[in-house]
Every structure is written in C-alpha cells, then in structure tokens.
Amino acid sequence: MNEPLKPVYLDEKLVEIRADGHQDYRSKALPTWCPGCGYFSMAEGFTQSLKRLGREPEDVVVVSGIGCASRFPFFINAYGFHTLHGRTLPVATGVKQANDALTVVAVGGDGDAFAIGGGHIPHAARRNVDITYMVFDNGIYGLTKGQTSPTSVLGFTTPTTPYANGDEPLNPLMMLLAAKASWVGQAYAGNPHHLTDMMAEAIAHRGFSYLHILSPCVTFDKTTRTYKNLGMMVRDLPADHDRRNLMAAMAEATKVDRPALGVFYEEERPTLADVMDGIAERARKGIAAE
Amino acid sequence: MTGTDVQFAICGSAGDGTIAAGDILKRTMAAMGYKVIAFDIYPAEIRGFGKCISRVRVSIEQAYSLKRRSDVFLSLNDAHAIPHVGEVRDFGAVVYDDAPIATIPEGAHISAHIRPAQLPYGASFRQISDKVTGNARARNLVALGYLAGLYGMPRDAFHKTIGRKFATKAASVTQVNVRAFDAGYDAGASVFKLDDVVMAPPPVGADGSRAQMMTGNGATVRGLLDADIDCFFGYPITPATSIMERLATDLPKRGGRMLQTEDEISAIAATIGAGYAGARAATATSGPGLALMTEMMGLGVIAEVPSVTIVSQRGGPSTGLPTKTEQSDLNLAVYGGSGDAQRIVLAPTNVEGCYRCAGIAFELAEKFQTPVIVLIDLYLSNRYETVIPPEVKPFAPKAIPDAAGRSSGPFKRFAFTDDGLSPRAIPGQNGGVHTITGLEHNELGRPADQADNHQRMSRKRHDKLLAATRHPGLTVAKRFGRTGKVDVGILGWGSTFGEILEAMYAAEREGISCSAMKVVMLSPLPVHLIEPFFDDCRIVLVPELNHEGQLAHLVSGTLGRPVVRLDRVTGAPMEVDTILAEIRRLALGPAAGNAA
C-alpha cells in the first residue's frame, strides 16, 4: 500500500489490458452509465472474474431487472436477459432449472432488488438456486433521476422526499442471512481489486450467493454516499471473523455505520438442482416421500 | 344422437359418497365402450354438509354437453335433492331411499315432490347397507347397484371398477363395497320397471379397453407430457391447481422438473426464463393469476421467447367466484398487458381439445417465438369425457435452435426476415451470444427507440403470428350442421360450445335453418374462416358466459359485422334451453342490422 506511485501511460496500459484477455467478456456496446459511476468497476470486476474462472461467454447468462445497474448485460459479452423491474431472480431461476450447466448471474440495483423485487429474494435464497445475485446498491433511483430507494439513509432529500426521507433503510445483508442465503458477502465499487476477488468467489460458490456492492451515484447523490463518504465508512471484516458462524455474520451486518467488506457467511447445502434430482430419483422408484 | 343416450343425476350431501358413486358409474360405462360426459358440482367448503350432484350422460356418440333433462335421478339426501327433482324428464325415473318416511315431516320427503309423469322407485338403501356391511356408509354403493340392476347393466363390469377404485386399500374394502353393490343390484333387478329409459348394450365392436375418463385438466396434463414438457412452474389457484399437482407426481418420473413458485409472477417469469434457455416450459393459472402475469406476457412478446400458459377461468372480477365457471378472461388473455402485445390464444371446446391444444401449444410457441395461452374454464377443467389417448404422440418434437456454423459477427437475434421469424440461439450455444430485452431493440437486441425501428419491429411481431391461423394439424375454427346459407348462425368458443351444438341440433329438428361455428384460435383471429360464416348467416348469435360479450366484441370489432349477444353469468354452464329460446326468437325476428 505504501509503494510510491508510478506514472501510468495510457497506450501501455491499453496494450496490457488487451493482452490480459478479460476484455473479450465486454460487448461492443458502449456503457450508458455516467462518467465516474461505480458500475464501471463492476463491469471490470465481472469480466476479470469470468476470465479468472475460465468460463466461456456462451456458458454464462446474465439476467437483470430494470434500472441503471440492470443495463449491465448489454455491456457484457455473454448471453443476457434484461427482464422486468424486480423479476430478475425468478427469471434466473427458470434459466437455471432449464440447464444446470450454465453459469447464471442475476444483477440489479437496490430498488429493483428490495422495493419491487423484495418478495422473490427469500425464496431464491431458501431454495439455494445455484446462481449468483449481485446487487449494485447506490441508495437511489438513478434511471428515473434521483428518487429515494429502500436503502436510502434517513433524512435523504430527493424529488419524492422533498421534506426528507423518513423511512428507515433496509439492511440487505441481514435480510439475506435470515433468508438462508448460502453465501453472503459485501464489496465496494471504490475498491475494485477486492470487488473482483469477491465476484470470483461468489460465482464459484455452489448454491445461492449474494454479493452486496456499495456504490455512489455520482450524478444524483452529492451528499450522502459519495466516494469520499463511503471510502471513509467501509472497513475490512475482522481478521478472525468466522464465516461459518451465522450469528457472527448477523452481528457484523448490524454495524451499518461502518459497513464491512468481505465474506460474511458461507455454508454448503444441497442446491435446488440437487433437490430436483432427488425428487426425480424418488419418483422413478415410486417413493412418495422419505 | 342415435341409440342409447341416458343421463343419470346423483344428488346427496357431502359425505354421502355422491361423487364416488358417479365416478364408479362413469368409469364403468366408459370401460364398456359407451361415450360419457360427466360433471360434478360440489360445495366450495372443504368441510360441512353442502350439496353434491354428479351428472353422468351415457351415449353411443361422444356428447359435449349435458342433456337438458336427466333420465334417471338418484337421491342420497332428500333435502338437497328436492329442488332438483324437476330436472327429470317425463317417464324418467326418480330413485330414493324410502325407509325413514315415517320419521320425516310432511313435505321433506322427496316422494311428495315427484310429478305424476315421473316414475318413482323407493328402496331401503340404508337398511340394505346395514344388513350386508354392518353400517349405513355403503348405501351409495347399494343405490348404485340398484340402478345397475334396474337397467340390466352387467354386474361384473361394475365389480372391476370398484376393484380398481379401492386397489390401494385393503382387499376387504373392495369386498364390502362389492357386497353392498350386489345387494342393491338384486333389489333393483327384482323391481318391475315402469319408466321408458333404455340402456341398450354398447354397439358391437365398441372397445372401451383403451378409453379413459379424463377431465379437461387431466387431458391438459397428458397433452403437456406427450409434448415432452421439460419444466413446469406454478402457484396454486382454483380451478387450475390439479394441473400442477398431477405434474408434481408425473413430471419427475421422466426427469422433468415441477417447481411451486412464490407467486404467479414468478411462475411465468421462470417459465419465460426456462423458455429462453431452450426448455419446453409451461405454467397454469386462473384469471387472477393471469392478471398478475400480464406484464411478463408483454416481455415474452417483445423479447420473442416461447412460453405456454394454461388458464382455467372462473367467475370474476377479482377473487370473484372461485368455484364457479365463467368465460370472462378472454379480453385479458387476448389483450392483457401494456402496449401492443399480440400473442397466440387457443380455446379448446372439449376435453380432447384440451389434450391437443396443450400439446401443440409448444410447437406454436417455438415456431412463432411467442407466448401461447391455452384458455379453458372451470366447467372444462373439471368435467369428464371419454378420451382414447393416441398410441403415438401426435406432437412435433422440440425445435432446438442451432447457431453453429453461422458466419462470424454479432448474432442478429431479431433480424428482419420475410416471415418475421428470426434465427434463435439458446445459452450454451457458441456463435449465438446475444442479449434480449423488454426495451424496444434493433436486430441485435440492443435498445433502440428510433421511430421507423419501432414501426418495423411492431409490424414484425404482429405479422409473424398471422401464419399461425393456417398452422397444419390444428383446428382453428370449424363449422357444424347445415352448410351454405342459413337463417341463424351461432358462433361460440370454449366449454359453452357443447351446449351451443346441442341447441343448434334441437333447433334444426324444429325446422329452423341454422348452423354453428366454434372459434378455437382467439388470437390471431382466423378471419378467413369466420368471414365466410358471417356471409352465410342472416344473423349471428354469440352465446358466452360473461357479462360484456367479450367474443362478440372481438369478432364484431375485427370483422366490422354486427352480432347478437347472449351473455349469462350464473356461475353455471349455459343452459341449452336458453340458447334454444334465443335461436327461436331470432329465427322469427328482425334482420341482423336491426337487432343488437
């Protein structure tokens, strides 16, 4: 961390980036995000993690909802399905049910996930569908120009909360832990290397993995979740954090003023596909129930 | 209808074994080679003493509606049966338990309500059951045996059905029920028959060995399975639930997957997700569920993803009449959703049609890359008809898209073509990588809102479906009865068409010049078949079970021709007499231009 900064020359950097190969996972479409948006590091981290895991673009399906974050699949070179507002998880579940061999990644923003789509989260988590759900949380509705979201802080002033937001923000990590997600982690757009590691780990996890990614909205939120504020708030999980301990994960998740980055919780248990295969086996043998 | 055509009605209280007796009767008749249609009515409550009626029509040719009048009526509970005894035709039979008459107040016994032209048969079912089985619980079997004895039906055919019905229980259960049946049979056979009901044996060569009694829901499941469905997603809702229950048992046996989702939105979302990934996927629901699904239907239309949705209608709007039949979701099925969202809607008119439509729906969904709705209703979902399933599956195998061998460059998933159908690729296929979206898009699938692009894409999605009205192997509309010019034409859809046919033939026998047409494909509308029918009819009547005349509006709006509406929302199937009376009125009445 304390090494002196070396100068970076753009042409050299581009050669280096192209040689790496992860750019093959980017589509030809130009991102529609605002300059400086945290979502650029998510696209970068995602392509790097796919490259690291060696997944072929045709074996990956990125399913998204509606919102700034949900434009994600257009910028990725993989199969993509930009669905409806809030319906990311059931569509992704259907894709995975149809073909277990696919790597299915669901992507959405905080409004897509926790407002309109909130009812689907516990069910995808408890079924342990073998997909990765990445929520890009900027605490605001960006695509509709800056309204309050379920993760906006108290007192946040927006066009729909001109007299300040009075709704307590949700705690996504606690929700997902309570819903029995088998992998729960948190990353920050301003820490791209860690973000890439977390994405790779989440995708590699067998079962439902939930990665919460904190990001600023550089256009519509100049006061609460800026790079500066988020950068000062985030911390690493304690070195001795036991990711197999649900109560320890819960305790860390309650510390919303100092969001921790890292893997909060992890467990191995049968996936939805495992359950389905078991049902098929019992059905063929004519066993109604065990 | 020639030869035997007898309708039995069995009425009792929940717990009397009314539905069970009707079930044994209809299965025995089908196994003997008769054609059967049967419909049970039971209370919405799980517990209690509500009214149950099982009606079973037995004939030589397959009938698609119940008769206006029952020939034989069996009461297992007089309090429930008295209001219905009037449905028995003159010289028909009314059979009842005569034992407790002394203890029942005057007027509460059914014998006081039988009309002079009806023939009464009293027998002591309760007593007989007590004597041969030690309790009165088997009195439904005693009464069924009495009917079989009275009309000289073969005893062993019933024994076989009873054996099959109780096959999973202890052998003694079958023995007790057979004993009760035989005791009733002896009593019935020894009675001097007064009515003119004739149960002639089935015609020589009639083979019931492969015949099955199937409900509309059962036939739908069979159709989905014979079309090799891969995935099913559903959420419980009356009257569609039995489809997912049956698939929960049968789909995993062949490696398929059934998932009960958290709501109807998830069910259709997962169905579309699975369809995108190349599976044959379906869901099933009723009107309230379809209302939730309409946003996803729009996504399926614009993203051009195949999906199959079975919709069994019930009374509406909102929670409406969950256990009563209605045909009021046509508008929702055809138009539901934001924007111009054309999709294919099929409405079978009988149980065998449910089988064919459910199976061919996948073929249509894949060929035309669109959602397909199969629209039935509670009456069709729950009624039984004799079906002989084909020995060879009659449906086309899954059309697996192939992106391999394609020239390089980005995959144009929504390429403009002459027939509007673009090349498809599914995840996992090299060379076909693309993203689909609910946003208006260009040929690559990337968001594009230019005026001429939206115009062209809208036309592509609309025009590609037109060929579906001429799809081989599918009856999209069909005319019945007299050909050429007629006075009154009756246009119908769905379960009501059985009653329409019955009324049309009755009117014809009265000398009225008439003809009927069923419309199976409601969207896109097969105008090339409906328009000539209008040309041939002086006036067109559209009977349907909704209050707004939904098919009438669809057809007259599309064709620009007037129709006469006949709308009923009683929660029950339309009465043949109601349709017949309207045909009579129109046959004497003013020309079409002055009506409506």
Image: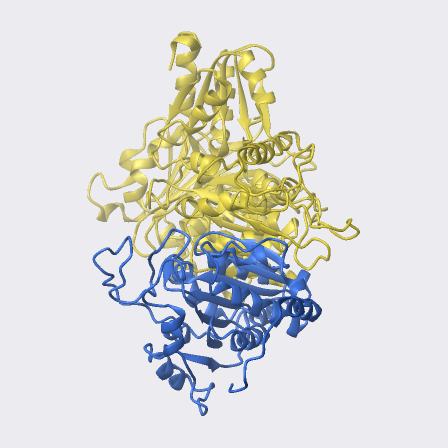
Chain colours: A blue, B yellow
Q: Residue furthest right?
A: B405
Q: Where does residue A112 sit, x and y in percent of width and height?
A: 42, 58
Which quadrant holds the C terminus of chain B? top left
Question: Does residue B314 appear in the picture of this structure?
Answer: yes
Judge whether A167 appears above or below B543 on screen: below
Residue A75, located in which quarter of the rendered image? bottom right
B542 displayed left or right of B126: right
Q: Nearer the viewer, residue B357 or B309?
A: B309
Q: Where does residue A119 sit, x and y in percent of width and height?
A: 39, 61
Q: How many marks?
A: 0
A258 displayed left or right of A105: left
In the image, what residue occupies the spot 28% across and 49% down? B100
Q: Where does residue B107 sit, x and y in percent of width and height?
A: 22, 38
B127 displayed left or right of B497: left
Q: Nearer the viewer, residue B225 or B380?
A: B225
Judge whether B246 appears above or below B468 on screen: below
Q: Where does residue A263 sit, x and y in percent of width and height?
A: 48, 81
Q: Nearer the viewer, residue A1 or A89?
A: A1
Which quadrant holds the N terminus of chain B? top right
Q: Residue furthest bottom?
A: A240
Residue B128, located in which quarter of the rendered image? bottom left
Question: Does residue B192 appear in the picture of this structure?
Answer: no
Q: Nearer the viewer, residue B214 or A272?
A: A272
